[in-house]
Image: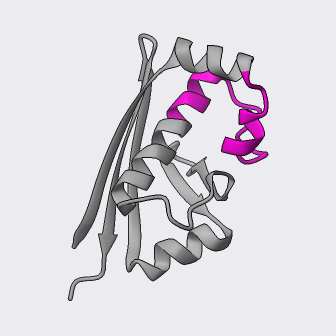
Amino acid sequence: MIVGIGVDLVDVPRFERTLARTPGLLTRLFSPAERVLKPRSLAARYAAKEALIKALGGSDGVHWVEIEVASEPSGRPVFALTGSTAEVVAARGVVALHLSISHDAGLATAYVVAEAAPE
């Protein structure tokens, strides 16, 4: 059963300028594994995290660095949640998260569907 849907769109050049102006954002928003990625990939991951928060209905108990966007061997993006964020998501009854991300022509987008077990 779908319990939440979230979508986000990020202007990649604007995101790059923001990171350049405020370098501390890199450590506040991204896990160590994500920090080595190119800006367009970081923008897509930022969009994914925003879309997840929207799908969950809010950010209470959610911490940015505990939301990592990883890739399966096929390249499919997946969330790797840790710490209190994983606990909060589970407590909300979410059993599966579906993620799609893309970046092209200066834009990055993400779409998240949060799913709970059928009642």
Q: Is residue 40 above or below residue 82?
A: above
Name the residue at 72% across, 48% down.
31
Q: Quadrant of the N terminus?
A: bottom left
Image quadrant of residue 19? top right
Between 25 and 65, which is closer to the camera in this rendering?
25
Residue 61 painted magenta: no
Colour pattern of the rendering: one colour
Image quadrant of residue 114? bottom left
Residue 43 painted magenta: yes
Name the residue at 75% across, 45% down.
33
Q: Tell me residue 3's x, y (percent).
A: 26, 68
Q: Tell me residue 52's x, y (percent).
A: 43, 53
Q: Is residue 77 above or below residue 86?
A: above
Magenta stretch?
22-45
Q: Tell me residue 102's x, y (percent).
A: 42, 30
Between 96 and 89, which is closer to the camera in this rendering?
89
Q: Is residue 116 above or below residue 63?
A: below
Name the residue at 57% across, 21% down.
15
Side of 1 where 44 appears, left or right: right
Q: Is residue 87 above or below residue 54?
A: below
Between 77 and 88, which is closer to the camera in this rendering?
88
Most extreme residue toward the bottom is: 119
Q: Quadrant of the C terminus?
A: bottom left
Name the residue at 55% across, 12% down.
13
